[in-house]
Image (tube, helix red, strand yellow):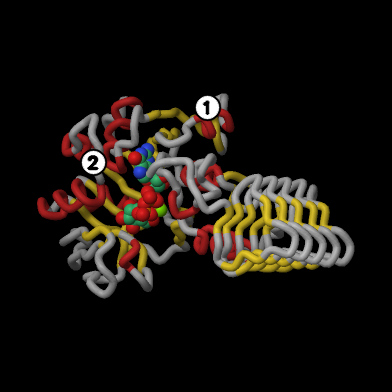
């Protein structure tokens, strides 16, 4: 089976880390997020992935120049302009010549979903499309998807106001679609699968939902991007992993606790890093504190500076000696639209 993986969004909520790097090329522990996604698909029998690209496509083309990732072939569909989720699916399917049952994934989701069970459910129900569903505490950030006893979707409400969601089962971002769904998407314009296509299919009674309680995280916010990595360190998903790269230089007197430290990072003596991600090549000065925060590649945190409270420091950014960032972003501005 082939899978279209959507990776063309602006990653707005993770700026400035995503100003110049697509969200799915950010590392999760030691590898870009997209590799975790493709590996999971390959393990479930997917034999080709079509990457649906829009924003910053070169980052992917440069990283996988021979068109292989996790040992399966990757093809690329680069939109001339962002077409939104359904427009992107139609464009990628047309480019790849898809005319059979196929998978679609939001490329920023990390999950242990049993994709084979999802496909089997789809085939057994005779659905035109099947959406994987996961339960969450706050459905208002997601597409909310009520179903009847057979799993038929009875409505699809994207990001309802807080307190108005009809249930707490949400669109988990993995779909099995019949090619007829493509005919529902007008080519060449922005179309949202969540706001247009799925609600119409729910009305027509051809959309089904597959409930799964497998591990699931949408990594699109600083909190979830950090959390998914702390889960790997904590052993929440499989055996606990080490987050400190062999090629990091943790100097005597530095403290590193429950954190991901990339290759080439230098942590000076007296610095303290806790519940944080520090990406490749960054320098953490003497006595500095980095806590519950994200630091991009080649950043510099000056001596005695504090980066705490879910702060986000961009690639190459500088935090001055003794400066304090608490829930702040550095730099704050953005050079990109979206
Ligand atoms: N190619 C392309 N073109 N990809 C896009 C575009 C586009 O114009 N817009 C967004 N994407 C990609 C993003 O890169 C991401 O992988 C995926 O589509 C979903 O976009 P997000 O921006 O992450 O959406 P969301 O997290 O707010 O909501 C979506 O995901 C939730 C679950 O994680 C929706 O599908 C919700 O219904 C769902 O609950
Ligand atoms: Mg998302």
Question: Foreground residue, 58 or 76?
Answer: 58
Which of the 4 image quarters holds residue 170?
Answer: bottom left
Gap in Å between the C-alphas at discs 2 and 1? 28 Å
Taking the spot 38% from the left edge, 36% from the top edge, the residue there is 2
Q: Is residue 37 visible?
A: yes
The picture places residue 314, in percent across and down from the top left corner, at 60, 50
Left or right, 252 with reference to 329:
right
Tell me the crowding category of disc 2: few under 14, some 14 to 19, or many 20 or more residues within 10 angstroms, Cα based.
many
Placement of the C terminus among the 4 image quadrants: top left
Q: Which residue is mark 1?
A: 67
Which of the 4 image quarters holds residue 45?
Answer: top left
Taking the spot 17% from the left edge, 60% from the top edge, the residue there is 155
Q: Are marks 2 and 1 in contact (CB under 8 Å)?
A: no
Taking the spot 54% from the left edge, 30% from the top edge, the residue there is 68
The picture places residue 206, in percent across and down from the top left corner, at 15, 50
Question: Foreground residue, 246 or 273?
Answer: 273
The picture places residue 65, in percent across and down from the top left corner, at 57, 26
Question: Foreground residue, 327 or 217?
Answer: 327
Q: Which residue is mark 2?
A: 191
């Amino acid at each position: 089976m082939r899978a279209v993986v959507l990776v063309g969004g602006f990653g707005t909520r993770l700026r400035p880390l995503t100003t110049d790097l697509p969200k799915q090329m950010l590392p999760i522990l030691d590898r870009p997020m997209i590799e975790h996604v493709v590996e999971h698909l390959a393990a479930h029998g997917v034999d080709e992935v079509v990457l649906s690209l829009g924003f910053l496509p070169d980052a992917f083309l440069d990283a996988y120049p021979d068109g292989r990732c996790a040992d399966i072939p990757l093809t690329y569909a680069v939109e001339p302009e962002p077409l939104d989720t359904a427009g992107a699916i139609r464009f990628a399917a047309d480019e790849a010549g898809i005319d059979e049952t196929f998978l679609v994934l939001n490329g920023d989701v990390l999950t242990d979903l049993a994709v084979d069970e999802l496909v089997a459910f789809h085939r057994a129900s005779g659905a035109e499309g099947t959406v994987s569903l996961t339960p969450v505490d706050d459905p208002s950030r997601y597409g909310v998807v009520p179903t009847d006893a057979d799993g038929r979707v009875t409505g699809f409400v994207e990001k309802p106001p807080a307190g108005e969601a009809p249930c707490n089962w949400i669109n988990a971002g993995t779909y099995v679609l019949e090619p007829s769904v493509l005919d529902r998407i007008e080519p060449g314009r922005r179309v949202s699968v969540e706001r247009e296509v799925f609600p119409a299919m729910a009305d027509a009674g051809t959309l089904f939902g597959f409930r799964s309680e497998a591990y699931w995280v949408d990594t699109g916010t600083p909190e979830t991007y950090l959390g998914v990595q702390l889960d790997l360190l904590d052993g929440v998903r499989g055996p606990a992993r080490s987050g400190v790269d062999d090629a990091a230089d943790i100097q005597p007197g530095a403290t590193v606790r429950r954190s991901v430290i990339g290759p080439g990072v230098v942590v000076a003596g007296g610095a303290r890093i806790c519940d944080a991600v520090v990406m490749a090549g960054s320098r953490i000065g003497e006595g500095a504190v980095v806590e519950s925060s994200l630091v991009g590649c080649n950043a510099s945190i000056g001596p005695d500076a504090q980066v705490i409270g879910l702060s986000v420091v961009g690639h190459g950014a500088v935090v001055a000696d003794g400066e304090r960032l608490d829930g702040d972003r550095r730099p704050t501005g953005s050079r990109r639209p979206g």
